[in-house]
Image (spheres, rainbow, N blue to C red):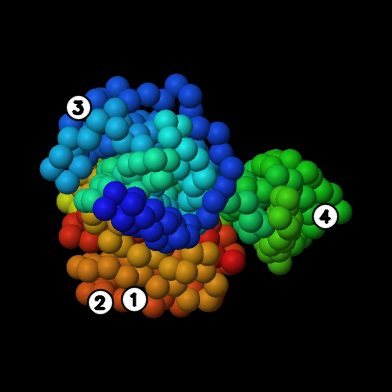
Amino acid sequence: MKKTIVLFIFCFAFANINLFSQAICECTSDPNCIDIVGGTNNAKPGEVCPETLPVGTVGVHYSVTLTIIPPTSAEVGGITVNAIAAIKIMSVQGLPTGFSYCQSSEYLVSGQRSCVVLSGTTTESGHFPITLNLKAYGSAAGIYFALPNGNVTDNTLFIDIEPGVIVVAPIANFYVNKTDPTINEPIQFTDMSINEPTSWLWNFGDQTTSIEQNPAHTYQSEGNYTVSLTVSNAEGANTKSMPAYIHVHATATEVAPVAQFTVDKTNPAVNESIQFTDMSANAPTSWQWDFGDGLGATTQSPAHTYHNIGDFTVTLIAENGTGKDTITKENFIHVKTNAIASNEIFNSVLVYPNPANNELTVEAENVESITILDVRGLVVYYGQTKDKVNNIDISNLPNANYIVKVKVKDQMVTKALLKQ
């Protein structure tokens, strides 16, 4: 009878071992990880170290080693077992997109720690609770066997991924404070390029150039001048040219403004102050702001507070004695509640594929709106929807980093997107 039992255990153990097919990797377990709990330990047999995982960054490779040790004792199948021989991670759930896991081969060595490596690179930021699915083992006569009802889970760990910048080729853009200067009047050129250029080459159209990011320049002769800016970084270069952009006059001539503005934030919370800054060219003397919530202002660079959640279109009319110009930025301000979207809602919103090429799919229940912004915070797509699955054509967007904001149940879920 004893031989039959031993033979049964032997076969049972090897049947279980043959089912373990996840990747095996070399890793070094933490010798300082010890069982500090002891006694009955349903939720967490043994110890998992570290207790807090390091924070990751979008686009940056992440790797962490978890050490797992058997408990001194645990309740398994309603029975307190004082000699758990080994413990193994069967699977890891909840990892960010792009992450994977592999385990050491140490777990069937009695009394020895085992380890698992979580690693990868993701394009998605957020809070990711992870689940370790564990199995407890006993041993007899040097043979390991899975304990009945020995499957348990550990839900104490999470990985936080912060937004990061994935380096892609820049897209050139610029702004000038005056397009109709007089001879020898300084004008300021301001780089507005996206995707973090590291070098700049300006051509002012009068046979002079500059490699500064934001140069000042004066023209010595009347005429119309084409201005171009070439920006580059490690991933490539891009040029923007503005034909006959600067009109130089012999004497001062007042011309109509060219309206433009910026803000210090486009995603404030309710009742959070926002600073609007006038960037209009050609010296406007009056300003008319419409913040999209029934309120406005006539100061040059006002502060404003929104008292309700929602997406708001902002309009600026800049005027002087010669004329006026209007700029409208549709659904430019996205006011959110003070509450961060719950993990359940965050994880329920799917944005794929990521990286994306020509089409993006956003999938979630109870979607109210979808907004895509570039790295400057400018809205490049906005749509209201009640569909669970939304296919969005992004073929016209430049290859760059974007932020996808999905409004679900009055909560805003933010996810990073790479278009390539």
Could you tell me the amino acid type at mark 1? Answer: Asn
The residue that mark 4 highlights is 206
Coordinates of residue 172 in the picture (x, y in percent) = 65, 57
- Residue at position x 55%, y 34% in the image: 28
- Residue at position x 53%, y 61% in the image: 418
Which mark lies nearer to you, 4 or 2? Answer: 2
Q: Which mark is residue 387?
A: 2
Could you tell me the amino acid type at mark 4? Answer: Asp
Of 408 and 107, the residue lying toward us = 107
Q: Secondary structure at mark 2?
A: loop
Coordinates of residue 295 in the picture (x, y in percent) = 21, 52
- Sequence order check, earlier mark of 4 and 1: 4
- Sequence order check, earlier mark of 3 and 1: 3
Q: Which mark is residue 66?
A: none
Q: Would you say residue 403 is visible in this rendering?
A: no
Against 134, is 173 above or below?
below
Asked whether the residues under the numbered discs 4 and 1 touch, taking CB atoms below 8 Å apart as contact, a structural biologist would say: no
The residue that mark 1 highlights is 390
Which mark lies nearer to you, 3 or 2? Answer: 3
Which mark lies nearer to you, 3 or 1? Answer: 3
Asked whether the residues under the numbered discs 1 and 2 touch, taking CB atoms below 8 Å apart as contact, a structural biologist would say: yes
**Is 178 left, or right, of 148 in this rendering?**
right
